[in-house]
């Protein structure tokens, strides 16, 4: 597998998503330091993959988009009590199991983020647009279905959705990024 190719794919998707979210004014001008969030990414992704892969064929935008909700929920938990959040045995499963995979978006929007109904609709539209961008990015590359390259590109797509969810939620909570030094 060509790692540099998959790295370029992820960077291109990152740039597209970031520009889109900046145009909507839902992320800060400067990207957040995601170090804390990266420390739990592997665990979250590994736990998410069986659900995400199963849903991808029939519901690709859901499979990709739900990870943005997860990123937002984890950012909210980070703000409330990061030690408790990161010490959970399985952060993703804890989010999913409250209402199930199909209703995880509603659970995160309503109960974790505590959004009003109109805010839930706006967020669903935003995440749907980002998920479409992710799915189109995968389709545009014409990865061979079921190939290792396709799988790695899917994981990288999920990674970007997760990071975008984190960035959106951090700005919603009032965090402003500034350069140090």
Image: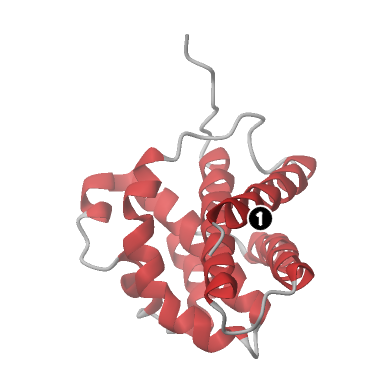
Q: Compared with residue 140, is residue 52 higher up or lower down, i.e. above or below?
A: below
Q: Quadrant of residue 34?
A: top left
Q: Compared with residue 31, is residue 149 higher up or lower down, i.e. above or below?
A: below
Q: Compared with residue 66, is residue 176 higher up or lower down, i.e. above or below?
A: above
Q: Identify the residue at horizontal 66%, vertical 59% (top origin).
A: 119
Q: In this view, which residue lies farthest toward the top? A: 181
**Residue 104 pos. (x, y %):** 49, 76
Q: Identify the residue at horizontal 53%, vertical 55% (top origin).
A: 3
Nearer the observer, 156 or 97: 156
**Residue 123 pos. (x, y %):** 66, 60
Q: Identify the residue at horizontal 74%, vertical 63% (top origin).
A: 133
Model colouring: secondary structure
Regarding mark 1 in the picture, which secondary structure is present there? helix
**Residue 46 pos. (x, y %):** 36, 70
Residue 113 seen in this snapshot: no
Please name the residue that numbered disc 1 is placed on: 9
Nearer the observer, 61 or 124: 61
């Amino acid at each position: 597998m060509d790692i540099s190719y998959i790295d370029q794919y992820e960077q291109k998707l990152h740039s597209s998503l970031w520009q889109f979210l900046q145009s909507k004014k839902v992320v800060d001008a400067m990207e957040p330091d995601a170090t804390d969030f990266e420390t739990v990414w592997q665990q979250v992704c590994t736990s998410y993959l069986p659900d995400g892969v199963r849903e991808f064929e029939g519901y690709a935008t859901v499979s990709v988009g739900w990870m943005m909700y997860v990123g937002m929920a984890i950012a909210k938990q980070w703000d409330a009590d990061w030690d408790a959040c990161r010490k959970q045995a399985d952060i993703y499963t804890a989010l999913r199991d409250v209402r199930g995979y199909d209703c995880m978006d509603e659970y995160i929007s309503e109960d974790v983020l505590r959004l009003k109904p109109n805010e839930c609709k706006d967020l669903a539209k935003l995440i749907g647009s980002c998920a479409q961008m992710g799915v189109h990015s995968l389709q545009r590359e014409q990865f061979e279905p079921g190939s290792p390259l396709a799988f790695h590109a899917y994981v990288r797509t999920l990674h970007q959705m997760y990071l975008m969810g984190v960035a959106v939620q951090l700005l919603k909570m009032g965090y402003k990024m500034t350069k140090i030094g």
